[in-house]
Amino acid sequence: MSDLTLLTATFVCAVCGMAWLALAMKPHWAQVQSAKPHTAAVARRLRVAGVVALLLSLAASLGADHPSMAVLVWVMTLSVSAVIVAMALAYWPKCLIWLSWLPDGSDKPTGLIGGGTVWSSGRMTRPRSSFQSGSTHG
């Protein structure tokens, strides 16, 4: 594999890993995913996915360079990806909804958890919005 491909994989895995670790926290999950509750099982799956993605990022970095340079590149990639995820959560949290997909253990496909289509009584439907119409400002 070429170095560019491995470095791209390093970056993509680092961003996904940081986003999954952020989504494992209740406040960030609520920003991105208000339709699905934040349970301990969801948080555990997100943490495991985040750690695995960061380890894959390290492995891709080690494949691209010699170890001393690979660790330096990996640490810099982690910091850049953390800033990217922080800015996404601050300005456009719904852009991370595609990363909130995780199998929930049931036999029915869930699509994007709460953001895409979900199975309801055997047919695909869109979830209803949790926002009320009208203003409550006083």
Image (cartoon, rainbow, N blue to C red):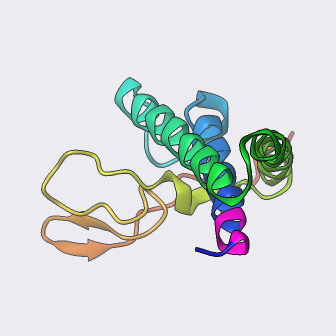
Q: Which residue is at the front of the view, 20 or 78?
A: 78
Q: Residue at x 86, y 50 (%)?
A: 87
**Residue 69 on image: x %, y %:** 82, 45
- In what quadrant of the picture does the C terminus appear? top right
Q: Is residue 106 left or right of residue 4?
A: left
Quadrant that contains the N terminus: bottom right
Which of the 4 image quarters holds residue 133?
bottom right
Q: Which residues are magenta?
A: 3-7
* Main secondary structure type of the part rendered in magenta: helix
Q: Where 80 falls versus 68 (above or below)? A: below
Left or right of 85: which side holds 99? left
Q: Position of residue 4 (x, y in %)?
A: 73, 73
* Camera-side residue of 16 and 2: 2
The x, y position of residue 92, in whole percent, is: 78, 58
Residue 20 falls inside the magenta stretch: no
In the image, is residue 117 above or below residue 38? Answer: below
